[in-house]
Amino acid sequence: MAVYAGPVQDLIDELGRLPGIGPKSAQRIAFHLLKLSRDDAARLARSIVDAKDRVTFCRQCFNIAEGSVGALCAICSDDRRDRSVVCVVEEPRDIVAVERTGEYRGRYHVLQGAISPIEGVGPDQLRVKELLARLDDEGVEEVILCTNPNIEGEATALYLGRLLKPLVARVSRIASGLPVGGDLEYADELTLGRALEGRRDVDT
Ligand SMILES: [Zn+2]
């Protein structure tokens, strides 16, 4: 139901497509943007386009990487990182959460989501194939399943645990103790650091 003039409604519709922005928030943000000076609005628009142009996903782990397609992220291009351990997370922002703990020196693999039958996301929609390809190529000895402690994250960890167990020397899951139903990004670094340290072998 379009109640506003064309361009305003278009803006509200676009904002409403963003994650976590409902119709009311979309409307509030749209009217805030309309009050901005033209310069401020142009700066915001430019930063979106700039980020799209200059940021890509790492060809190895699917973290955010600066540069064009085929670039490696800062972690994959750091030779001091332990190649034998891979921490599997759902999104690049989870890497930031684990890095904040200062406890982890291995590498990562970003699934770009989690298994969710309700939303029609299965293993094929995630970067699982790419993870399997890395195991041999990089001599991976341990995979740490660091998906979120909610239904989707647990389902993903269960699936990957079964899949990876026969293929890697050690498959572990971060310890419980994180707030259940929450996201890794909201866990403080001490709690997440402990969960990482207290990880347990996956048994299937
Ligand atoms: Zn990478």
Image (tube, rainbow, N blue to C red):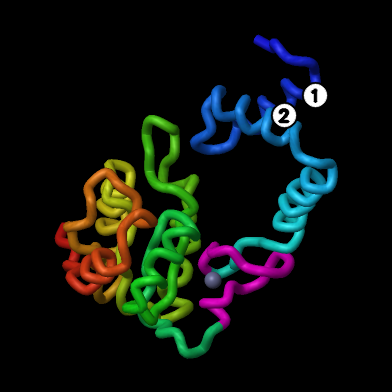
Q: Residue at x 29, y 54 (%)?
A: 157
State the CA–CA distance, disc 2 to disc 1.
Answer: 6 Å
Q: Quadrant of residue 169?
A: bottom left
- Whether residue 159 is visible, yes or no, is no
Q: Residue at x 38, y 63 (%)?
A: 88
Q: Quadrant of residue 25?
A: top right
Q: Residue furthest right?
A: 38
Amino acid type at image mark 2: Leu
Residue 92 spot, x, y in % from top left: 49, 60
Q: Residues within 10 Å of mark 1 (few under 14, many from 20)?
A: few
The span shown in magenta is 61-77
Q: Residue at x 53, y 38 (%)?
A: 19
Task: Inspect the magenta stretch and tell me whether residue 192 lies in it.
Answer: no
Residue 74 spot, x, y in % from top left: 57, 76
Residue 28 against residue 189 in the figure, above or below: above
Quadrant of the image for the N terminus?
top right
Chief secondary structure of the magenta portion: loop
Q: How many numbered markers are drawn?
A: 2
Q: Residue furthest bottom?
A: 80
- Whether residue 11 is visible, yes or no, is yes
Q: Taking 38 as reference, is 130 left or right?
A: left
Question: Observer-nearest residue: 26 or 105?
Answer: 26
Image quadrant of ligand 1 equals: bottom right
Q: Quadrant of residue 141?
A: bottom left
Q: What residue is shown with label 1?
A: 7
Task: Inspect the magenta stretch and tell me whether residue 74 lies in it.
Answer: yes
Helix, strand or loop at label 2? It is helix
Q: What residue is shown with label 2?
A: 11
**Is mark 2 in CB contact (under 8 Å) with mark 1?**
yes
Q: Taking 151 as reference, is 65 left or right?
A: right
Residue 194 spot, x, y in % from top left: 21, 70
